[in-house]
Image (cartoon, grey):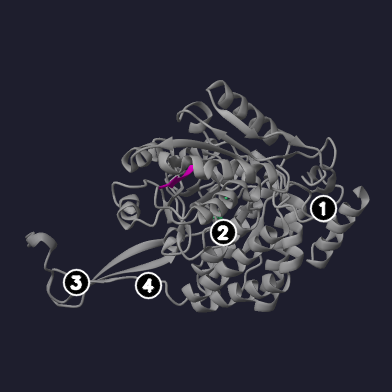
Amino acid sequence: MTASLRCEVAALLDSLGVSPDLYTGGSLAVKSPLTGEVIAEVSEVSAEQAKETIASSLDAFKAWRRVPAPRRGELVRLLGEELRASKEALGRLVTLEVGKVPSEGLGEVQEMIDICDFAVGLSRQLYGLTIQSERPDHRLTEQWHPAGPVGIISAFNFPVAVWSWNAALALVCGDSVIWKPSEKTPLTALATQALFLKAAARFGSDAPVALSTLLVGGREIGELMVKDRRVPVISATGSTRMGRDVGERVARRFGRSILELGGNNASIVTPSADLDLTLRAVAFGAMGTAGQRCTTLRRLFVHSSVYDTLVPKLVNVYKTISVGNPVEGDALVGPLIDVASFKMMQDSLKAAADAGGTVHGGTRVDVNGEASFYVRPAMVEMPSQTGPVLEETFAPILYVMKYDTLDEAIALQNDVVQGLSSSIFATDIREVEQFLSAQGSDCGIANVNMGPSGAEIGGAFGGEKETGGGRESGSDAWKAYMRRQTNAINYGRTLPLAQGVKFDV
Ligand code: UN1
């Protein structure tokens, strides 16, 4: 097994066009969470190299902003083609590097393809407004210009999709991109960069050399980029702690940050819910990706009238769901990313039990020995929303609580510092609409009759409060990658001033 995993990774990287010197003999050891073994040693950039990369990215931006947007879209179309052609290989690499089950590894690449398609269309639709001027013979308008190099900091759990949400939009918007991937997942980043370079080579000389660059390295490399004024936009995905730091540093230099941080997502199960559908949705929402999505379902509020029907069934699903190495069988729950994640999960479960919770599952499952961390997902029936329930533990723990009125459930749902995603299970239209109203969910995403995770790329993705307020991916999220310019044009021969001000000299 040991030798073969490393060999398979090398073969995949080779097929994806990554040169072996990038992932052998380097200082960053990459472990597969499937077995815990080292599968590659990746070279890291020095601070000096990172600064040079930023300088070349700025040069690339200056050339790229002159290329017409629909032509820029052509490059992203070619990137989408490369991703389609390599979907199997890249999806498999996601599975080996992150431990996602195969359909989720492939789904991640599909998400990349989808955002490329979206961005291609967008490349002809970067519309500005025409505004009625209050002055005679004047025209008032706004246009959107490229912003500059965009720094992308991504997390291990969506190691490549999050890059693509940012990069596909930034590239059609006329920006260059600089990517600092998670130290846990540099291999999928190298592969994605290789696919980008293939697309750029097919595109031709209009694509400047450093249009998309990769900075593999530690926290200090990310910090260097975050502090650099030449990078006007920083898009960061990860923990609230990291995002607070990034947001403050970027704000200090009046840069713009797009933050996609922690979630503590809830669903409300009302008396009118379709309980069979609810059961399936809760299972995917809470246990899919081994609870390691920022949109993972972490809190479930169940109406007291359906609690005793739904919850025992849920306990049974938690008992029986298949946990295992997803490349060896057809397990639905793969490993946690590493030992730190396992420890955090155990700490939270202990705190939950101390706070009066009844814990189902959560124990370690021996799949591939000591170096990998597989767990049976945990469901905890809590007497109230206290202690670890208020925090995001990036692991499969679902806290279940009872409620009596929808007002109470919505208040509890909103009574956490995070505000990413939420959902309601209901067929009563009044309850649905109340949940979606201004007095309802306070999250960036509010779904009906599905869990909080698994968003399509067409909508804007992100959340409020300590989730950071940023929006990525669909809708008009592209505006964050451009700068807006308002133009007032006087085509008359007099100089009427706005607000009727007189200033005759
Ligand atoms: C994340 O976990 O960082 O909505 C992103 C979802 C995915 C993206 C999750 N499309 O669950």
Q: Residue furthest right?
A: 3
| Mark sitting on residue 58 | 2
Q: How far apart are marks 4 and 3 (CA)?
A: 16 Å
Disc 3 residue type (three-letter):
Gln
In-image side of 292 versus 100 (left or right) = left
* Earlier-in-chain disc, 1 versus 3: 1
- Residue 176 painted magenta: no
What residue would you read off at disc 1? 23
Q: Where is residue 1 in the image (x, y as percent from the top left)?
A: 91, 50
**Magenta stretch: includes residue 269:** yes
Q: Residue at x 76, y 58 (%)?
A: 93
Residue closer to the observer: 19 or 428: 428
Q: Is residue 12 above or below residue 182?
A: below
Identify residue for label 4: 127
Q: Say which residue appears at 52% left-offset and 58% top-offset.
A: 455
Question: SS at mark 3?
Answer: loop
Can you give x and y, in whole percent of width and height, for residue 461 in the image? 47, 56
Q: Which of marks 1 and 2 is nearer the N terminus?
A: 1
Of the numbered discs in the image, which one, if any, rests on residue 132?
A: 3
Q: Residues within 10 Å of mark 1 (few under 14, many from 20)?
A: many
> Vertical placement of 41 versus 79: above or below?
above
CA gap between label 4 and label 2 equals: 25 Å
Ligand 1 within 8 Å, label 3 CB: no
As shown in the figure, which amino acid type bears the numbered disc 1? Tyr
Amino acid type, label 2: Leu
The disc, 4 or 3, on the residue closer to the chain's N-terminal end is 4
The answer for how far apart the CA atoms under marks 1 and 3 are is 57 Å
- Range of the magenta residues? 262-270
Q: What element carries label 2?
A: helix
Marks 1 and 2, how far apart at CA: 27 Å
